[in-house]
Image (cartoon, grey):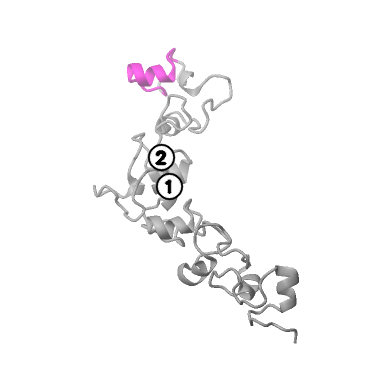
Amino acid sequence: ALPDTDSDGLTDGDEVNKYKTNPLVADTDSDGLTDGDEVNIHKTNPLVEDTDKDTLTDGDEVRIHKTNPTLADTDQDGLTDGDEASIHNTNPNDPDTDSDGLSDGVEVFVLNLDPLKIDTDADGVNDGDEDFDSDGLTNLEEIVTYNTNPALADTDLDGLSDYIEIVILNLDPLKIDSDNDGINDGDEDFDSDGLTNLEEIDTYKTNPAVAD
């Protein structure tokens, strides 16, 4: 058998010539994983203690947090594993720690809600069922169904709220000019009554989808 002086699962020759690791030290980067395990099992860098740069050592990810040491955001919720473990105390393996339907990242970065509480303001309504921007659509509807911004009543900034575009006018809440005719949705006259959609909604409080 080829010599493996430090018994880390890599031959001395491979350590010196291929991986540039220390053949006399089983864990060259002192991250808690042997060089052999890093190379053969976890596919991490045996020369860097934090392969994915999420502020958690590869060893802590594997042994303590059970996260992927090669992926900075294991659960793909918008928060790095390190931030989840060290700052927010959320579960780095669960994209929605409090099970309110909103990802931890959306709660922290978009809505400024508590990712550990299903009902942040304790008003009896789950965070996902709240309407943060008061546009008539719940946070969950905006994120899951329509892909609109739950923190902005008018995602495409055409003067029409997301709710009006979706429910009343059947327009695209993500496009300022849904039909690409060069006229912003707010300046269109959906019901052909001589008043623009915006005039009906903002000035006269009439239904922009009904001429009479």
Task: First in sequence, mark 2 or 1: give its number.
Answer: 1
Percent position (x, y) of residue 52? Answer: 57, 59
- Residue extending farthest top: 194
The residue that disc 2 covers is 150
Label 2 crowding class (10 Å Cα cut-off): few <14, some 14-19, many 20+?
A: many
Quarter holding the C terminus? top left
Task: Identify the disc placed on residue 5.
Answer: none
In the picture shown, does residue 85 fall above or below 101? below
User: Mark 2 or mark 1, which is nearer to you?
Assistant: 1
Q: What stretch is highlighted in magenta?
A: 193-209
Q: Nearer the viewer, residue 97 or 185?
A: 97
Residue shown at 51% from the left, 27% from the top: 176
In the picture shown, does residue 182 fall above or below 123? above
Q: Is there any visible trace of residue 30 in the rendered image? A: yes
Q: Is there any visible trace of residue 212 in the rendered image? A: no
Specify the amino acid type for callout 1: Val
In the picture shown, does residue 13 fall above or below 88? below
